[in-house]
Amino acid sequence: MKYQKDIKDWTLDFSISIVKLSTLLKKAKIDFDVVDQVRRSGTSVGANVREAKSSISKKELIKYYAIALKSANETDFWFEVITKGYDYKSESIEYCWGELKQIEKVIAKIILNLKANLSETKV
């Protein structure tokens, strides 16, 4: 499967965007706990994709991609908290959220393809 962007590079770029966004959120007086959660879950996506790339088995590879997807889902939750709970809107959060939605789709597709390939090898 070939994507326009390598998922490892894409999630690294996303993590860098999250770090920059967290600086803006701090300046906007969003509570530290919320900013910290966005930063932790958002950067975890890329960290787990990177970990997946060095897996020793397909099952382990799927596991790390699944963790990356869970982190992406958590980041999505925190974006909702910020935009709805704090009524915060900016181009930066919109950009990050748009990237996150695309990354979630790609990671989900990777997981589905890996699971299909895994079951095919068992038959």
Image (tube, rainbow, N blue to C red):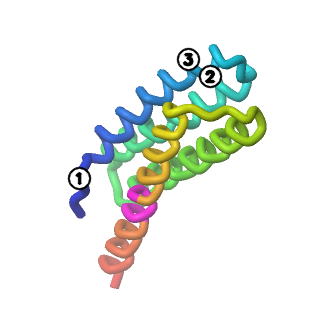
Image quadrant assignment for residue 15: top left
Tell me which amino acid carries mark 1.
Gln
Question: Residue at horizontal 43%, vertical 45%?
Answer: 99
Residue 110 is a magenta residue:
yes
In the drawing, what numbered circle is on residue 4? 1
Q: Quadrant of the C terminus?
A: bottom left
Residue ID at (59%, 50%): 73
Question: Are there few (<14), some (14-19), or many (20+) residues within 10 Å of tag 3?
Answer: few
The residue that label 2 is drawn on is 25
Residue 36 against residue 65 in the figure, above or below: above
Residue 7 x %, y %: 32, 47
Q: Mark 3 and mark 1: span between their CA atoms?
A: 29 Å
Q: Are marks 3 and 1 in contact (CB under 8 Å)?
A: no
Highlighted range, magenta: 106-111
Q: Secondary structure at mark 1?
A: loop
Question: Residue 23's mark?
Answer: 3
Q: Residue 52, relative to residue 32: is it above or below?
A: below
**Residue nearest the observer in this picture, 21 or 40:** 21
The residue at the far right in this view is 85
**Is the Cβ of the residue at disc 1 closer than 8 Å to that at disc 2?**
no
Main SS category, magenta section: helix
Q: Is residue 48 magenta?
A: no
Quadrant position of residue 36 = top right
Residue 10, how many percent across, how many down? 33, 41
Q: Are marks 3 and 2 in contact (CB under 8 Å)?
A: yes
Q: Secondary structure at mark 3?
A: helix
Q: Is residue 118 above or below residue 123?
A: above
Of the two numbered discs 1 and 2 on the same chain, state the one appearing first in sequence.
1
The mark nearer the N terminus, 3 or 1, is: 1
| Amino acid at pointer 3 | Thr
User: How far is disc 1 from disc 2 in space, using C-alphas?
Assistant: 30 Å
**Element assignment for label 2:** helix
